[in-house]
Amino acid sequence: MKKKNNRSPWSWIPTLYFAEGLPYVAVMTVSVIMYKRFGLSNTEIALYTSWLYLPWVIKPFWSPFVDILKTKRWWIVSMQLLIGAGLAGVAFTLPTPFYLQASLAFFWLMAFSSATHDIAADGFYMLALDDSQQSFFVGIRSTFYRLASITGQGLLVVLAGFLEKSTGKIPYAWSLTFFILAGIFLAFFVYHRFVLPYPNTDTGKSARTSHEVVTEFGNTFQSFFTKKGIGLAIAFMLLYRLAEAMLVKLTSPFLLDSRDVGGLGLHTSEVGITYGTVGVIALTLGGIIGGILASRQGLKYWLWPMALAITLPNAAYLYLAFYQPDNMIWVNTAVAVEQFGYGFGFTAYMLYLIYFSQGEHKTAHYSICTGFMALGMMLPGMAAGWIQEQLGYQHFFILIMILTIPTLVLIPFMKVDPEFGRSKKEKQTDC
């Protein structure tokens, strides 16, 4: 029986990238809100959930084996099955006395499976589509990834809040929520098992010997760490989001904490709407506008404005912490301003990773860059909860503003080709 290779990309790209976004949101954001509702301290939440970044930090070390062993298609459907099992595991263990250790173990399983799924999905995208299709669908895949964020941080958190109110039992409410998410993911597994095409180039077999693979692996890393300006580049990867890395770990706890300890006292559903829906929409708009503008004048032109955008709007949380407004319009506006700035400023970060990855091993080097990106979020995030509990929310957000300084200090030293990032149309217009 001939395997089908002529599936329309519309039949699998939206669902594939929706499935790519959901577990990341569940591990990185939904877990923070859930553990806060279970009564864990900010120190515990920030430390435990920051460790979950580790699979994305070390992803470059096992990405070559995803290329060599089995097919990308096999990795995708297998990881979706594992992620679904991990979600079900979280759901089963939440009502138990040992929920913390057990749920963290399942979140670890999901994190490693999700990071592996990312590698396979992005590789499959390049194998299954020609160049023109890849360009056409790049916006589609990003859109559905963002929709997954809204679903995870927004709709599912709102659902958990509704179940909290209706059942009066927080563990039971979150258990039901994760059962629903597990069901969604198992449906993705079944769907993609039959719908994903079978690209002829997705063989999963290397023509090289094991010795050649190991040698090439070593050469790839050596060539990355001997690049010109590597020290400054690594500093940029680790420090550009320093303040944001600490802020993001305490955003949901701040919104949920009672007013007498400096928080805003929002309900779980309100956090789902404010941070998981309004915030994600603002983040997406910021990223879209940032991409459009960068394609016109290039990365170098927009580097300073984008660095300011990812740092200065953090002051919105100073306003929320000092004034603790009751009006949800002000709360939503403040969150939207900060998230829009983050989305706009993050454009420069991603473009710089692409710029620095250029060369013979650009795919592997980009993967290494994303490892440093995850490390830059992991390390500051681990300490964020303890620092906040020592300082209180007001002084913590003052510290966040101080930590924006290293980002701005780096910018004058960054060397970027003025033409990088500009579209061909814009370059031709100048000519």
Image (cartoon, rainbow, N blue to C red):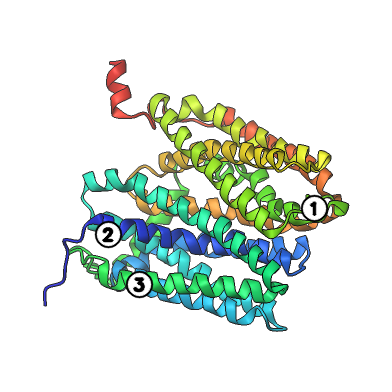
The single residue placed furthest to the left in the displayed view is: 1
Query: Of callouts 1 and 2, which one flags the residue occurring earlier in the amino acid sequence?
Result: 2
Identify residue for label 2.
11
Residue at screen point 52% across, 76% down: 86
State which quarter of the image contains the C terminus.
top left
Say which residue appears at 66% left-offset and 54% top-offset.
271
Identity, as a three-letter code, of the amino acid under mark 2 = Ser
Spatial CA distance of label 3 from label 1 is 41 Å
**Rendering quarter of residue 236:** top right
Quadrant including the N terminus? bottom left
Q: Is residue 290 left or right of residue 216?
A: right
Residue ID at (45%, 76%)? 82
Residue 86, above or below 342: below
User: In front: mark 3 or mark 1?
Assistant: 3
**Looking at numbered disc 1 in the image, what kind of residue is underneath it?**
Gln
Which of 330/95 is in front?
330
Q: Earlier in the sequence, mark 3 or mark 1?
A: 3
Please, is residue 136 above or below residue 104 in the view?
above
Secondary structure at numbered mark 2 = helix
Q: Residue 430's quadrant in the figure?
A: top left
In this view, the mark in front (2 or 3): 2
Which of the marked residues, 2 or 3, is nearer the chain's N terminus? 2
> Residue 50 bears which disc, if any?
none
Which residue matches tag 1?
A: 388
Q: Please, what secondary structure does the residue beneath circle 1 have?
A: helix
Query: Which quadrant of the structure image shows residue 202?
Result: bottom left
Q: Which residue is mark 3?
A: 77
Q: Is residue 11 visible?
A: yes
Nearer to the camera, 176 or 85: 176
